[in-house]
Image (spheres, coloured by chain):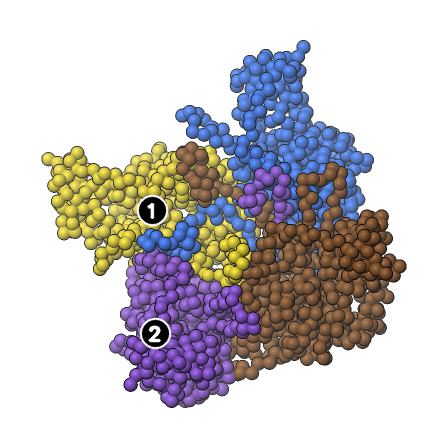
Chain colours: A yellow, B blue, C purple, D brown
Amino acid sequence: MALTGVEVAKHNNAKDCWVIVHGRAYDVTEFLPEHPGGQKIILKYAGKDATEEFEPIHPPDTLEKYLDKSKHLGAVDLTTVVQEKAAEASPEEKERQLRIADMPMLEQCYNLLDFEAVARRVMKKTAWAYYSSAADDEITLRENHAAYHRIWFRPRILVDVEKVDFSTTMLGTNVDMPFYVTATALGKLGHIEGEVVLTRAAAKHNVIQMIPTLASCSFDEIVDAASGDQVQWLQLYVNKDRAITEKIVRHAEARGCKGLFITVDAPQLGRREKDMRSKFTDPGSNIQSGQTTDTSQGAARAISSFIDPGLSWSDIPWFKSITKMPIVLKGVQRVEDVVKAIEAGVQGVVLSNHGGRQLDFARSAIEVLAETMPVLRELGLEGRIEIFVDGGVRRATDIIKALCLGATGVGIGRPFLYAMSAYGFDGVDRAMQLLRDEMEMNMRLIGATTVADLNPAMVDVRSLYNHGATPRDNLSYEVYDPLVNPPQRQIAGGTTAKAKAKL
Amino acid sequence: MALTGVEVAKHNNAKDCWVIVHGRAYDVTEFLPEHPGGQKIILKYAGKDATEEFEPIHPPDTLEKYLDKSKHLGAVDLTTVVQEKAAEASPEEKERQLRIADMPMLEQCYNLLDFEAVARRVMKKTAWAYYSSAADDEITLRENHAAYHRIWFRPRILVDVEKVDFSTTMLGTNVDMPFYVTATALGKLGHIEGEVVLTRAAAKHNVIQMIPTLASCSFDEIVDAASGDQVQWLQLYVNKDRAITEKIVRHAEARGCKGLFITVDAPQLGRREKDMRSKFTDPGSNIQSGQTTDTSQGAARAISSFIDPGLSWSDIPWFKSITKMPIVLKGVQRVEDVVKAIEAGVQGVVLSNHGGRQLDFARSAIEVLAETMPVLRELGLEGRIEIFVDGGVRRATDIIKALCLGATGVGIGRPFLYAMSAYGFDGVDRAMQLLRDEMEMNMRLIGATTVADLNPAMVDVRSLYNHGATPRDNLSYEVYDPLVNPPQRQIAGGTTAKAKAKL
Amino acid sequence: MALTGVEVAKHNNAKDCWVIVHGRAYDVTEFLPEHPGGQKIILKYAGKDATEEFEPIHPPDTLEKYLDKSKHLGAVDLTTVVQEKAAEASPEEKERQLRIADMPMLEQCYNLLDFEAVARRVMKKTAWAYYSSAADDEITLRENHAAYHRIWFRPRILVDVEKVDFSTTMLGTNVDMPFYVTATALGKLGHIEGEVVLTRAAAKHNVIQMIPTLASCSFDEIVDAASGDQVQWLQLYVNKDRAITEKIVRHAEARGCKGLFITVDAPQLGRREKDMRSKFTDPGSNIQSGQTTDTSQGAARAISSFIDPGLSWSDIPWFKSITKMPIVLKGVQRVEDVVKAIEAGVQGVVLSNHGGRQLDFARSAIEVLAETMPVLRELGLEGRIEIFVDGGVRRATDIIKALCLGATGVGIGRPFLYAMSAYGFDGVDRAMQLLRDEMEMNMRLIGATTVADLNPAMVDVRSLYNHGATPRDNLSYEVYDPLVNPPQRQIAGGTTAKAKAKL
Amino acid sequence: MALTGVEVAKHNNAKDCWVIVHGRAYDVTEFLPEHPGGQKIILKYAGKDATEEFEPIHPPDTLEKYLDKSKHLGAVDLTTVVQEKAAEASPEEKERQLRIADMPMLEQCYNLLDFEAVARRVMKKTAWAYYSSAADDEITLRENHAAYHRIWFRPRILVDVEKVDFSTTMLGTNVDMPFYVTATALGKLGHIEGEVVLTRAAAKHNVIQMIPTLASCSFDEIVDAASGDQVQWLQLYVNKDRAITEKIVRHAEARGCKGLFITVDAPQLGRREKDMRSKFTDPGSNIQSGQTTDTSQGAARAISSFIDPGLSWSDIPWFKSITKMPIVLKGVQRVEDVVKAIEAGVQGVVLSNHGGRQLDFARSAIEVLAETMPVLRELGLEGRIEIFVDGGVRRATDIIKALCLGATGVGIGRPFLYAMSAYGFDGVDRAMQLLRDEMEMNMRLIGATTVADLNPAMVDVRSLYNHGATPRDNLSYEVYDPLVNPPQRQIAGGTTAKAKAKL
């Protein structure tokens, strides 16, 4: 017999805490101190239905998997659960709803950055903050794209470019375009369906999707959403408990994944201040003296406490022993480690700084690529490994630059999340179509008919290492109180405030 | 007997579509799917008079030339055609009319950029967007001028500069100033008379005009507008149908053109997002569900579908076989291809990136020039070919820099279009006069009395290759949501909104 | 018997001037011309109680120490002193009070720059100006932090970073974090308790505090505030009277100080225009003709006239003779002088430009460090001296960059002052905790488990010497009157002011 | 007998034109076409009193010197001259008067740029435009100061700097500070007394004044204003008529001038668009059709038509033959011409680009100096010539940088004009005092006690040649119409205009 809301509601405190999720009750009392997101957020729902808050942050099988069966209390008769009277929408939320009503038509998005502009307007502030935030001053976040702006083309002319073909091969898979959908966490923050939307778009355009460890959908949901022989890869955060890791890897291989991308740039997930600030709730002036406040660390910390900071080169042989999938190290950041990866016998590396979300002032992948390839050529190691780059790719010209410099392919993450958040499947579909249009145009304009035609002589990278044009240090810029010229006096009173400011 | 408006009006749909242009009716039903600009724009005028829309985009002989004679339905009695009641001017258009009434006097324009400022105010938004737009993020568009700012002068003093002479010779023609009017499309978007305005100004100042393939005026109209022994060149987009190309080339030579400039940087015409956005029409909230929308690709796509992307070096001998005009390749972008052009036996190249309208991150012509000349000198090829540059030239100092670095002359396009759009012939005349004044002044100040005096030791190009000062990436800049300092709270309520923003 | 206010009030002019400080009267008539801050400020309080003005600028023992005993007039019965009716708060002050009421919660400060933003809002304008101001155009002030932005990381991956330890040793003292609280003057301008707040925070986090010569608290108060075996250093401005200097040094050593930091970059204290402008008081329109005005030189000049500009290398042996404390030269600015310091046998140098407060266009300490270490290595002098840097450190990444380049530790000054000014002890405590969190995170992300792991191959300094990105020259930028395009005319009158500005 | 106003008023047109200046009438009918400033401005005063307009542009002896005696009509009885009823002040002028009433006290000016800020507020628009304007896009104008910002200090520490002495010797004259007041035209535009104000300030501070050819005061007035053995130099624009030039030179030598500075960078005076735009008068909407407009070329052209563009190296021996004064070439811009100057046997050169008023993109003097000195050292020519620099000097640090790099002294022009325009003699006096204070401070801080101590090892010029940080190209920047993100639609109507702009 189902539990009633009245019964559940009695267990509404830290000493005795039940919550309802998807129509079932759970006793989370003992779990409270272990909750990666902190106990405060759970206690807010003690004795109540927490589904709405729970949903985008956790795959549906989370409780089944991680909470001891003894704490599963069974079904709840939801008709007996008092629905919280929907709080009236805040002024901020009302404005957002108006912005949604006014949002541009999909056809008005002409490039990948346009989706970001629309997503920023229509997403919930906290969701936007989670997706868009990055480490410290977000210098690397912006450098990732800016670095492409320091590479210029040397196009060939009078090449017959009637037919251009930009299909290529990644880890043995033929793809229509030289990019893949890289792994990004918590897809349901942007769209109610989550990562499966990306699965469908990748299928339509015949590009590969990398499935994130921290997806909102469960791994199996995402694999199930694939169509036909659609190829997927697995992104892996390595768990301190290697048994769990092994289970995940074997399951992925069994379900047909064609590549294992081990994240190596995140022994601890980043502090992202924009995310933290967006989570902060001002208690207002009614603070009880002595009351402690919980400093939210943002979503990143909440979901990542299981990651093993002890992961090291010595773990690689073990990975090779448990899977036949090609192994790729995701997050390599200097040529020395690319050489080590070759020596370790892995099939690929992703030069990446995690979208600027981990170490600020990590260099852009494209700069590391330009450092790497000449060294590999000199060591006779070129072609011994597939090299991917991600971070900052927004234009087909960015992709072409990476390919000219020797990349096998590029990963694109946030732009597809933004397209999905703003327009769902149609947005991602259009984003990929726009890239296709740009690729065709720009392959022609650079004078290349196939990916193999692209080579280092087609780009000028002499300014790439020049970090003079570092993205602005916003916090530091804003707190600086600039010197001013002598102010006007207030005697005649004829100088208006504005004139005074200017004169 | 003339057709009546009533008769024409019956053929008002996609299955049976007539339109009136310049007082004659045409059956365009079968042509609809082939229209480079898409069928939607024609259907808007199905059964009606389309002259006003047709005019600036098509030379007057277009329909006679390209539509089968069987579809020419003959004259229409225009008195029987219902004139659409002129829609009341939109608020935007009213503001534009006020801006036209207030526009500065011609004498207030002191340099070429001033004309651009005025044109931006007084042109129709879509016309402005067509002229001013460029590829992707318009980085190359702006780099073209910015690159000149990285070249500094090393002037000679105590040279007798009482008499300065900046006349020179291009492809055998003596000209009064070392620039020419380069080819730009659709002149009637800016001025009702179109390209012939430029013809007259070029005649007055004894400089050469390059006639564009995509002019609003017909080729013959432009040649007819030339006076005396005025010299013109032909810019050529090569048609997939070489017979058409041959006809155009032979006709131009027969009519006296003195140079054939084959465009080699545009196998496909560029995507220009500013242009596309300006064309977008919001259907408003009354959209029928399921109704498809036509994504306008802007004017560039509309007019260019005939261009042959298969054009290659192997076509050059054929061109040499059909004309005695000097052949110049327009759009060369690296020194390797300049050397190839010499080997191919053409008379000149234009280092150009098509005004930034094709491949974004193509380097500026002036940078390619600085790369090219030392190589030619080293290979003993200097003087074997005439080298022109275009893109970004706004000041006589820009021209002098190009000449110092070895250019035969420079092409100027948009500035004259803007001068024409704002002030017609008088504008272009003044623009050329301003350049003449600047040339005289600056030749004196650099210590050169003739073009031959200008040499590489007069410029410092050490910073030219430094792309740190890349033009701002506007879209990327705008979508970035900057980190902020902690906000004030709302307790005392005394912090005004503005103060809050600042503090 | 105590003096009465009435009696004191009689001595209210330059010829006969008494003031009350902390309940005691002093005859300062003869001292007037010698007052470092000028006599005007004293005369304002002639015959009155000057305690409030006196307090933050002078250590409590100042009058006892520096004014001849004969001028100590004894206690005053404060009940007999007319309290100035508190002037109504100025509009500016009222706004400040509202800003204080609205200030963010401490938990909303996520990094060191956030404290600066809050301090700027809540500090008195003159106090803010004293702390934040720097020399001339404040270029070096900003360069100090900006320089760190030209250094990029080359992180190692797959290093076991489960345990990271960033403790280190400075001049023989073990500290928990590789920074120290450097000396900054006049702590009571920011917080009523002054420097002892910093003492307590340093104790809690086990880092060293450097005690400033120009503290608001007396030296002994600061030493007394230390807990247990807390280590402190002494910063020393060398007095023209070496006997005073010797007394100070011997006293510091006796009280347990473990390092003597001799300031060598301040033979004269800087002109700081922001500070000077904040002090300026407009006499309004009632100026008597002929009345002279006193040009305040700001707080810096007021407190520094005793410093000896004659200090030179030949004084070093004398210092070595009077103390066993390790001697460190604070303010070294080029490698030649680091070598000299080694030859002179001191134990350390601080590469520093005095927080940008002395010589504008002095290079950042981090740039001098990058210049210094390769030379020391080449000369075989590496390890012969401890090298500290200060100036511009705001992030743990800054600290790590300095350690990679060879620094023993970094000094942090203003950020702790700002944290103290905004939130008192809790602010400084949180600031240090934030640095600890950032250190842990970033040590992991760069792949280092101890300070010894950090090395020059982990950073890319190729852009460090590139001063293209010099901080904006505000005064020069503001006075420049930019060229404009031709303005609209006023005929139709339809162009609004704003449109005119933009079009 | 004196003429009457009535009589003069009859001669009020281009065929018969009299004007009154300083109480005397002149017949200028025949002179009209030769007036360097155009006839239009004279005709405005035909038959009237032109003194007010005439005054600041012409030295008082102009008419006596240049107008044939036969055209001197004698005294006018001014009581008979109808005074134009003073036009009511324009709104612009009223605002300016209010700004003057509110202007800061002199004591609030803390540096040379502050005077420029004040002058901009209180000067007449046309006067400001004449002083502040420069060539073309005013890039060189701003580069002149910006270049100093690319030079950084390498200060020495622990040098006894108790006594610092920055006196030096220029062309044999001992001066108290290493700068001189360089020649600038039309001093009365800024202050009613004109250049003699500068004479007095130079005397007070014992620095040299260079007397301009185009002064508002006559040469003799300026020499007469000198006190005691005050040293002055003569700046010379060479007249096409060498007899006039010889007369001027011999007269200057006779009157005691100690140096002859021949301007070599101005064969023709520059086009300055800010100046031209300020002069433009909108005829409004009442323009008669066909009426021609006079395009003012600004003050520069008006006063310079006599300058000889034929001046060349071959003229130098002649100058040496007519004077014993040391000869200095003012406006040298590359090392090759410095070497030539040494060969020509002159005593000095001024590296200068005429304050950015002549050739835009001429390099800064400080950059040319850094190029020059190493070459001279290599050629063994160091010390063979005195090298001055001018342009962009605003801080003592700028002066010190120039001296470190080998300059004998620096010229300062506009800053003193601005100080004079804002505050008269007191302004210039304070400006010089501020430089003295800054010199003393910064000599100490760099560790130099005399000018001889300054050397190239004290500066880091590695970034000087890096022109990435070119001053903004304002016109080009303003006319660029930036790409935007897709706009919000107008359906819900809830997005405010401002939000739309931002989102």
Mark 1 chain: A
Task: State the image coordinates of residue A253 (x, y, percent, origin top left).
Answer: 30, 43
Q: In which quadrant will I find the N terminus of chain A? A: top left
**Residue at label 1?**
A126
- Residue at coordinates 40% horizontally, 25% vertically from top-left? B289
Mark 2 chain: C
Graded by Cα atoms within 10 Å as few (under 14), some (14 to 19) or many (20 or more), the crowding at tag 2 reads few
Quarter assignment of residue A174: top left
- Residue at coordinates 35% horizontally, 79% vertically from top-left? C6
Count of picture labels:
2
Task: State the image coordinates of residue A267 (x, y, percent, origin top left).
Answer: 32, 56
> What mark, if any, has residue C82 been given in the picture?
2
Graded by Cα atoms within 10 Å as few (under 14), some (14 to 19) or many (20 or more), the crowding at tag 1 reads some
Please indicate whether residue D37 sits to the left or right of residue B79 in the image.
Answer: right
Q: Report the front residue among C270 and D61.
A: D61
Residue positioned most to the left: A1
Q: In this view, does D88 lie above or below C31?
A: above
> What mark, if any, has residue D334 been given in the picture?
none
- Residue at coordinates 50% horizontally, 50% vertically from top-left? A148
Q: Do labels 1 and 2 share a chain?
A: no
Q: Please state which amino acid type lies under the numbered disc 2.
A: Val
Is disc 2 placed on a helix, strand or loop? loop
Q: Please state which amino acid type lies under the numbered disc 1.
A: Thr
| Camera-side mark, 1 or 2 | 2
Residue positioned most to the right: D70
Q: In this view, does D331 lie above or below D408?
A: above
Q: Report the front residue among A13 and C492.
A: C492
